[in-house]
Image: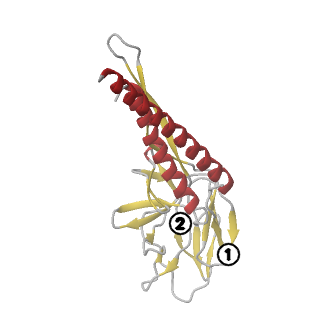
Amino acid sequence: MDSAGYVALGRHSGLMREMQVVANNIANMSTTGFRREGLAFAEHVARLEGEASLSMAHATARVVDLSQAGVVPTGGTFDFAIEGEGFFLVETPDGNRLTRAGSFTPNAAGELVTAEGFRLLDAGGAPVFVPPGASVALGEDGTLAADGAAIAQIGLWRPVDPLALRHQSGTLFDGGEVEPAEGGRLMQGHLEESNVNPVSEVARMIEVQRAYEMGQKFLEAEDARARAVIQVLGR
């Protein structure tokens, strides 16, 4: 296969990955706290001896969209939404992870956990415990009170290096080393929606599909040209 074929295949590979990312965004457009992702395309230019330079497409880096999503009221005592910068910090078997999904429930020990059972951590990195049967209120600054007495301070966190943020699974992110985030406020009885715009995602899916089809036609034309050359030279 000549250079043109390799270039087309490299672009095809990137388009396939982008289609997977877009499809995942659409599948999670109703997932609480989900953050849409995009794919970053890069160009690799190689110098060839005695020939023109060769440009290859490379697309492996995923970009997380951290824009604010809509906040909807739920009335749930342990439904918390973040407005502004920051993430909740939860404890998982693989280490602490960041999330914007704020739907928690008390477990048998009275600790606030996610639907997967991951414990919510406070501003000091300790699990948040709620006394059973207490009336719980959350302040905008993260102060959690039970029957009018402060019991914990829910912290908002961010990666020390913003470029270190990596989507792990679902609504969880690995941020590496984290630090307290400033400027965000917490809302009780609310949840943040997904920040996926279904119209723009479907439009992007159509664009990617058309680009893939154009590339496929080019590869078919290149294959036909190569076959014709072989037939002529083989006579």
Label 1 amino acid? Thr
- Identified at 52% across, 42% down, the residue is 212
Q: Quadrant of the N terminus?
A: top left
How are the residues colored? secondary structure
Q: Vertically, is 8 above or below 128?
A: above
Looking at the image, is mark 1 or mark 2 nearer the viewer?
1
Instruction: Specify the amino acid type for callout 2.
Output: Ile
Q: Please tell me the numbered disc located at residue 146.
A: none
In front of the other: 235 or 94: 235
Which residue lies under the disc numbered 1? 74
Where is residue 71? Give x, y as percent: 68, 64
**Neighbourhood count class around disc 2 (C-alpha, 10 Å): few under 14, some 14–19, many 20 upward:** many
In the picture, which quadrant includes the C terminus? top left
Q: Residue at x 66, y 55 (%)?
A: 197
The reply to whether residue 7 is visible in this rendering is no
Q: Is residue 209 left or right of residue 110?
A: right
- How many numbered marks does the figure carry? 2
Q: Measuring from the top left, give residue 8's x and y in whole percent.
A: 44, 33
Observer-nearest residue: 83 or 211? 211
Mark 1 falls on what kind of element? loop
| Pick the front one: 212 or 157 | 212
Q: Position of residue 179 (x, y in %)?
A: 46, 51
The image position of residue 104, as x and y in percent, is: 53, 75
Mark 2 lies on residue: 154
Establish if 187 lies above or below 228.
below
| Residue drawn at 46 percent across, 47 percent down | 17
CB within 8 Å, label 1 to label 2: no
The picture quadrant where one finds residue 124 is: bottom left
Please give left or right for residue 235 compared with residue 29 in the image: left
Closer to the N terminus: mark 1 or mark 2? 1
